Amino acid sequence: NCVGGAGKPPTTGESQWIPASRIIHLADIGNWNINIFGVSEASNGHPILAVTHNIFHQSLEIGEYNSLTLLEDLDINREKFFRYVQVIESQMHAENVYHNAVHVADVLHNMLWLLTEGELTERMRLSKIEVFASLFACMIHDFDHPGVSNDFLVRTSNKRAILYNNQSVNENWHVAQAFALLNGDHSEIAWDEAWSEERHYNFRKLCISLVLATDMSKHFALLGKFRSRVADSSNAAEAFNPKDPKDRESVLVMAIKASDIGTQGKVWSLARKWATVVQEEFYSQGDREKELGLLTSPLCDRDAVDIVKSQIGFIDAVLFPLYQPLSKVLPDVKSILTQLEHSKTMYKREMKSRSENED
């Protein structure tokens, strides 16, 4: 672990940094069903660094851009950027069963797929800085996550909840702390030092918007506006105007949301594993709530919540309503809808098999 506390880069010199020669090559970078758990294992627990390194060291077509030259095109100091990535990863807590480096690497990689195979870059004519911001926002979106929900932090009067007045506590913390690293006296990770004040302001503004959108308490309000735009358009693929920065941002907001909660749209072996880890983190929070004498949060009571029923409910109530309108704007997303259908079928099969065994 390179970092002692939030916002502190390594202090013990060059030996702390992982050299590029020791970072694994990912042959299946950009494949929606990449086994990110396998990536984490093969990279010695550095999946964020592995995915980020492979994005910017392989020649991947992202719309009309090439990922290999994107950092230089944007005047980003490559060496300092990859040090920064390592600082970010070092403060993802491995003790969190779900909100850890593997989840962040997965979300980052999901966004890569949407930008490339999902044709988001091409269809919305994203600028280079928007492409980079969408990947960067995914990388920092759960920075230093405590492994509990916003509601838990609020109900326990956690310092972070006090700091952010109970508003999107985790999300505000993630994005603020990630940018604080760039505002400190840490020249060894200041990858943006060549940027103008205006570029930095616009970049940070977009990243804040994207990260704050991952707060699930805002989910239905954001999705409602998006669905209305799609429904009101005679041609859904043209519901959002690529020439309008606000429209591009609206689609990017849905893209980071889809990237963040898209695990059930993976092949079944991955989908089922993700369901287990996310539920275990929920149960862990429920256990803590019981110990503290608090009311157990929804989905967190291990004595009452059924993981299979919970996942079917989540697919029906949250994932289908998100991915359906997104697939009308980005038609290639239909392949994820097909996998969501399959996951739901498999959960129903699991439920049926269980009830038969109980009989």
Image (cartoon, rainbow, N blue to C red):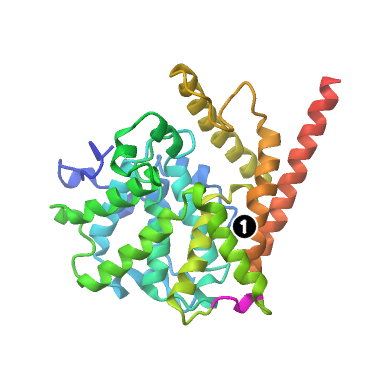
**Residue at the image point whose x is 15% and y is 42% from the top:** 11
The answer to whether one can see residue 27 in this image is no
What amino acid does circle 1 point to? Answer: Leu
Residue picked out by circle 1: 322
Which quadrant does the C terminus fall into?
Answer: top right
For mark 1, give the secondary structure: helix
Which residue is painted at 28% across and 48% down in the image? 177
Q: Is residue 282 magenta?
A: no
Quarter of the image with the N terminus in it: top left
Measuring from the top left, give residue 352's x and y in whole percent. 82, 33
**Position of 195 relative to 184 (above/below):** below
Q: Which residues are magenta?
A: 236-240
Coordinates of residue 50 in the picture (x, y in percent): 40, 51
Q: Could you say which quadrant of the image residue 161 lies in?
A: top left
Left or right, residue 23 beside residue 298: left
Residue beneath the point at 53% across and 26% down: 296
Mark 1 is surrounded, within 10 Å at the Cα level, by few (under 14), some (14 to 19) or many (20 or more) other residues, namely many
Q: Is residue 340 left or right of residue 141?
A: right
Q: In the rendered view, does 1 fall on the left or right side of 348?
A: left
Q: Is residue 263 left or right of residue 290?
A: right
The image position of residue 155, as x and y in percent, is 41, 31
- The answer to whether residue 219 is visible is yes
Query: Which of these two is toward me, 338 or 161?
Result: 161
Figure check: 209 above or below 269: below
Q: Main secondary structure of the magenta part?
A: helix
Residue 161 to residue 184: above or below? above
